[in-house]
Amino acid sequence: MNFSPEDVFDLCLDRAKELMGSEKYNSWLSNASFRSFEAGIFTIGLDSEIRVNFVKHNYKQRLEELLREYSDDPDVTVEFTHKPETLSIGNISNSSSHELFSNYLKPAYVFDRFIEGPNNKLAFATAYSVSFEMGHSSTNPLFIYGGVGLGKTHLVQAIAHHIKDHHPDKTFCYISSEEFLTRYVAALMPNKNKAREMEKFKDKFRNSHYMIMDDVQFLAGKEGTQDLFFHLFNDLYLRGRQIVVTSDRPPHEIEPLEERLISRFQSGTVVDIKPPMLETRIAILHQKLRDENIRLDDKLVLYIAETVKSNVRQLEGAVNLLAANIRIQNIAINIDNVRSIITEYLGSSSRRLNSTAITSAVGDFFSVNPSALKGKKRNREILVPRQVAMYLIRDLTDLSLEDVGEFFERDHSTVLNAIKRVNSMMAEDSSFKRKLLDIRESLLG
Ligand code: ADP
Ligand code: MG
């Protein structure tokens, strides 16, 4: 199934409305609600026995047809209930054998396709063991961190795939913290069923055996969302459910993040992924080249692995560009051509994303001279853009706090403060946040 059962249900109701006409729909189905999807059976809640009897008699078949169509599963059936839904906190409806938000999973992100090396070995081993045994006290929660493009999403999605394929009795939800925030905000929107929307939202998580949250650093500064996450976290944790979290930095560097969440994150296993070493890059390249059906001799593979170093996504980008050149431009594979493609590729990514380029883009955006950003003045017109530049350099490059400090001739604590400051400004001021995201977007091209 490509959609979650809830999504299928919503799509089906929309279509039913079109087919039945709104008058009939409003009389019989407008307050139909999704209750559960278990063992191929959609249970739909209606608010009275009369409605249940009428709908069963008149619309069951059509609803089944629609549900089958949208879920792409010819065997699903429908049942109806008029029993009220219990909404108390901590209510666990019988576990259902579906995965939540699984439409975000990429088929290729499986353990079999994850190449191990010294710099990701521990993260791999822990993720793998968690996918067999959930909620073990030493690995719950599992917190995986590392820079962009190093395989965090791949690893945690591999856990989800593993559960799906090998433990169909277990449920999971995989969601990015941005998506979590968006859905939470949607559930808060004025709506006559607001309380129920919120409970439905929470239930998605409460019913999961595995809760996998990707890129948790985006919760920084979002107090309400953090609070909800904290409660869901505790609820799951106390019931021995497994929590897996990824972030681009270790728990204590996520700012501002509530102390209680930081210590929760630190209470299980915290493991990092570092950029891959040469041998790992070679192995990853071989896999990628095989996927693309490209044969390169070992010297060329070594050349690429030695040249494209910063992360796996970059390696993949290089191979994609190479593949495009070979297929579309029909270029011959030889060292000169490969070298010029790789040089061009690295040039285009590093030109955009080095400290100078970022500082100059920030300067342009705030209409201040970029060299002033590196200077000593501390008035607000300069200070804020300088902090933004520090923030973005740290965000978009692999430079450490020290490296960024060095660029601005300051120490790492100044950079850390700048990042904290920018995070809290973003949390307080949505127009500031939009500006920052615009600059970021333009830098990423
Ligand atoms: P992150 O979430 O850390 O930013 P991703 O998981 O999105 O990184 O990985 C970026 C790309 O690199 C993905 O296409 C992923 O499949 C690939 N990748 C990362 N690490 C590995 C690895 N060890 N073996 C194979 N592919 C990898
Ligand atoms: Mg990721």
Image (tube, rainbow, N blue to C red):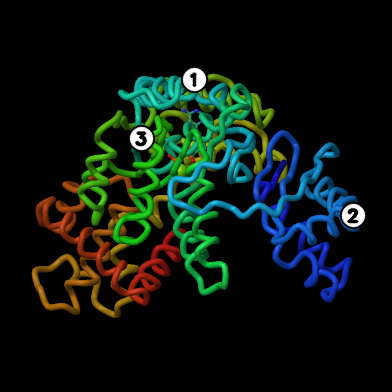
The one nearer the camera, 321 or 440, is 440
Q: Say which label, 1 or 3, has the lower sequence index.
A: 1
The one nearer the camera, 343 or 118, is 118
Q: Residues within 10 Å of mark 1 (few under 14, many from 20)?
A: few
Q: Say which label, 2 or 1, has the lower sequence index.
A: 2
**Relative to 431, is 301 on the left or the right?**
right
Specify the amino acid type for callout 3: Leu
Residue at disc 1, secondary structure: helix
Taking the spot 10% from the left edge, 56% from the top edge, the residue there is: 410
Specify the amino acid type for callout 1: Phe
The nearer-to-camera label among 1 and 3 is: 3
Q: Which residue is mark 1?
A: 132
Q: Is mark 3 in CB contact (under 8 Å) with mark 2?
A: no
Taking the spot 67% from the left edge, 57% from the top edge, the residue there is: 33
Specify the amino acid type for callout 2: His
The answer to which quarter of the image holds residue 220 is: bottom left
Q: Which residue is mark 3?
A: 238
**Relative to 178, is 86 on the left or the right?**
right
Q: Is residue 137 above or below residue 275?
A: above
Residue 154 shows in the view:
yes
Q: Is residue 340 above or below residue 23?
A: above
Tell me the distance, in whole angstroms, between the alpha carbons under discs 2 and 1: 45 Å
The nearer-to-camera label among 2 and 1 is: 2
Residue at disc 3, secondary structure: helix
Tell me the distance, in whole angstroms, between the alpha carbons under discs 1 and 3: 19 Å
Q: Is mark 2 within 8 Å of ligand 2?
A: no
Q: Which mark is residue 57?
A: 2
The mark tally for this picture is 3
